[in-house]
Image (cartoon, grey):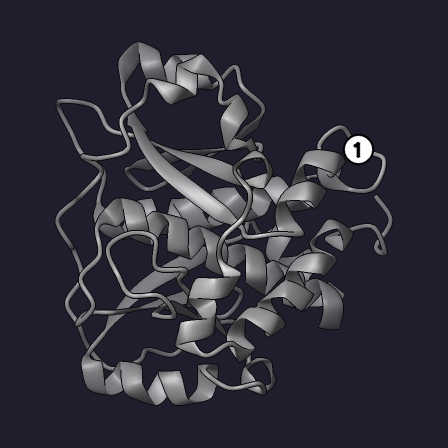
């Protein structure tokens, strides 16, 4: 893949993100809806066996890496087998659905196009996005609920982003299930990759070559507010910040910022 082609499929997402961040909360409601036949989503499958659950922070990090890896895979480049599905997905809302699988269910989804990522004790498979009206039966029967996990981090001040790692910052005062947050961290990774592709292709190449490493931090309300000031305006990327703003279909209000990615280490 040529340097120019790497991440090129994400160009519409960078533009879409700028538009989304410019909306007032009430405008998010008007902007979020699509005709049923146009709705596309990426399925995130969390391996959740009966005997042992993965850690919360590892599941969130794995979801971020897996969702991003789909878009940077050479098959998603122009002319690749995945290009059209990914391109169609990033031109609109980048919806994600988190499901859980175990045993034979988990093995079955390995046969579907996608990428599996392991982070410590967590395994997540991101599937090639497609229309929600054309969902494979092996995926459709997987449960969406029941993906919650105990939080394994303590809220604190903003840490320094490690070198070569994307820092995913989460608000301790806005409760969300693990499944919801996995979708949000997946958004964060994709948007970061889109902005890096547009402004710093070398950094994106290095992040990819390292395996798209990510780490998760839980911020106090005070620390989150300070980060929100940097990430919530039109100049956020000048500070290497990416805010993920939710459409408000589930759990939280429309326009709520759910994740602030700090890319200063990349």
Query: Would residue 69 be visible to someone looking at this image?
Result: yes
Residue 218 in the figure: left or right of residue 1: left
Q: Is residue 50 above or below residue 137?
A: below
Q: Residue, x 32% and y 42% (percent of image)?
A: 120
Q: Nearer the viewer, residue 163 or 227?
A: 227
Q: In which quarter of the image is residue 16?
A: bottom right
Q: Residue, x 27% and y 19% (percent of image)?
A: 102
Give how far across and how far down residue 217 sits, in percent.
29, 67
Q: Which of 182 and 22 is in front in this view?
A: 22
Q: Quadrant of residue 252?
A: bottom left
In the rendered image, the quadrant that contains the C terminus is: bottom right
Q: Nearer the viewer, residue 180 or 33?
A: 33
Local SS, label 1: loop
How many circles with numbers are drawn on the protein? 1
Residue 40 in the figure: left or right of residue 222: right
Q: Which of 39 and 174 is in front in this view?
A: 39
Give how far across and how far down residue 68 sits, in percent.
56, 48
Give how far across and how far down residue 172 sits, in percent.
19, 69
Q: Residue, x 18% and y 62% (percent of image)?
A: 175
* Residue carrying label 1: 80
Residue 90 in the figure: left or right of residue 67: right
Give how far across and how far down residue 85 sits, in percent.
68, 35
Q: Residues within 10 Å of mark 1 (few under 14, many from 20)?
A: few
In the rendered image, the quadrant that contains the N terminus is: top right
Query: Would residue 264 be visible to someone looking at this image?
Result: no
Q: Residue, x 61% and y 52% (percent of image)?
A: 92
Residue 77 in the figure: left or right of residue 163: right
């Amino acid at each position: 893949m040529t340097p120019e082609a790497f991440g090129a499929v994400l160009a519409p997402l960078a533009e879409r993100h700028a538009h989304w961040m410019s909306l007032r909360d009430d405008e998010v409601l008007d902007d979020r809806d699509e005709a049923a036949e146009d709705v596309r989503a990426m399925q995130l499958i969390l391996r959740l066996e009966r005997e042992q659950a993965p850690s919360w922070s590892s599941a969130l990090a794995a979801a971020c890496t897996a969702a991003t890896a789909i878009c940077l895979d050479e098959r998603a480049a122009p002319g690749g087998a995945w290009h059209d599905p990914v391109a169609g997905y990033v031109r609109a809302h980048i919806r994600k659905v988190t499901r859980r699988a175990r045993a034979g269910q988990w093995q079955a989804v390995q046969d579907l196009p996608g990428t599996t990522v392991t982070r410590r004790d967590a395994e997540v498979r991101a599937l090639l996005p497609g229309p929600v009206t054309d969902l494979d039966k092996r995926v459709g029967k997987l449960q969406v609920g029941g993906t919650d996990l105990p939080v394994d981090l303590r809220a604190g001040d903003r840490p320094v982003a490690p070198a070569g790692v994307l820092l995913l910052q989460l608000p301790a005062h806005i409760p969300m299930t693990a499944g919801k947050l996995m979708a949000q961290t997946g958004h964060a990774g994709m948007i970061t990759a889109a902005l890096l592709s547009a402004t710093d292709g070398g950094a994106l190449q290095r992040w990819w070559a390292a395996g798209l490493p990510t780490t998760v931090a839980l911020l106090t309300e005070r620390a989150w507010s300070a980060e929100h000031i940097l990430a919530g305006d039109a100049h956020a990327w000048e500070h290497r910040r990416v805010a993920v703003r939710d459409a408000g279909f589930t759990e939280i209000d429309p326009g709520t910022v759910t994740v602030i990615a700090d890319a200063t280490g990349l």
